[in-house]
Amino acid sequence: MLLDVGTDETHALGYKQVDDDPNVGVLIATMDDTADWQATRQLHAWERSQLSLRSGQRLLDVGCGLGDAALSLAEDLGTGGEVVGVDASAEMIAAARGRADGATCRVRFAVGDALALDEPTSCFDAVRSERCLQWLTDPDAAVAEMARVVRPGGLVSLLDTDWSTFELNVGDAELSRRVSDAMRSERHRPSNIGRRLAHLARGVGLRPVAQTMATQTWDAWSPDESPAPGGCFSMSSLAEDLVERGHLPARDRERFVSTIHTAAREARFSMALTMFALVAVSPTTGASGR
Ligand SMILES: C[S@@+](CC[C@H](N)C(=O)[O-])C[C@H]1O[C@@H](n2cnc3c(N)ncnc32)[C@H](O)[C@@H]1O
């Protein structure tokens, strides 16, 4: 898909209904940017060592997006294993299929709903989901579905952003406070899902065995080259969001954006966002399942 991210000054990054979004190309390109975050790479490495997948095993990725994380983990499954990726977006699934050529194990990418997985009970050795729960109407139901399809003793890995940790610093304390306050309130989705992962897992009978977090930081950004810091929403859409939620008077919208853009041009810009990761085990009726 051809993209011109630089022409879009207002993209808001909504992944509830990717295929209906006029900025679907931006949404897809942004997934490549977020995959390249240092924090994402750190959590992926941690997840890989925690899962310790073995040859012949089966892995499911729920809300797999472009499929890269699943395909990377698939390297541990040998020729006899299988990786399955499910995503609500046909565009994401088409892109994921296009990236699956080099895989050595069996690969199946399918359009599907995290809230009603079209997979048999107890049929995967491991199930993962990354930055999908925050977009769902019922994250508890989605984790229950993951717990259903993983085998007893199998592992469920959850990675998600916690938007309540988001900080924007441009040398303007009032602006930073407005952004932090807005990010701590529910903004069309659970803003603090990242730190709720263990609670979600325990709620469906999974036992957390390991947790970690990683903070992504942005120390520089050129608004003249890209409308948004890599992998993030544009500052115009952030302003729009704050106005809509009552955290910024509409008359201050332009000034809010220009303050951030000016600070970025003058190297007075930084942002930070923390992502959380959890691995939990599905209970066994007998002895240890790992
Ligand atoms: C922010 S993207 C993350 C994609 C990928 N997991 C990653 O980390 O790069 C969120 C993904 O969740 C998918 N999604 C949203 N609602 C879904 C649902 N109900 N069932 C399955 N996937 C869903 C979106 O289509 C999108 O691909």
Image (tube, grey):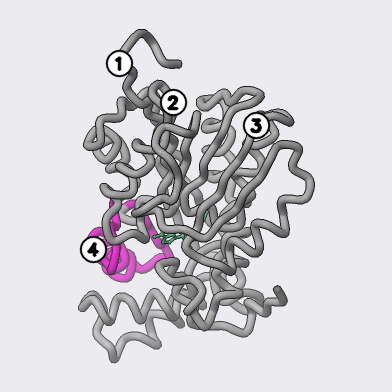
Q: Residues within 10 Å of mark 2 (few under 14, many from 20)?
A: many
Q: Amino acid at mark 2?
A: Gly
Which x, y percent locates residue 229?
A: 55, 66
Cα–Cα gap, marks 1 and 3: 25 Å
- Residue 120 left/right relative to 22: left
Closest to the camera, between mark 4 and mark 3, is 3
Q: Amino acid at mark 1?
A: Thr
Element type at mark 3: loop
Q: Which residue matches tag 1?
A: 285
Residue in the picture at 56% in, 56% down:
110
Residue furthest out toward the front: 120
Front-lying residue, 165 or 150: 150
Cα–Cα gap, marks 1 and 4: 38 Å
Residue in the picture at 57% in, 60% down:
31
Task: Point out the stretch of residues depicted in magenta.
Answer: 165-192
Callout 1 touching callout 4 (CB < 8 Å): no
Q: Is residue 23 above or below residue 138?
A: below
Q: Residues within 10 Å of mark 4 (few under 14, many from 20)?
A: few
Q: Which residue matches tag 4?
A: 186
Which x, y percent locates residue 44?
A: 56, 38
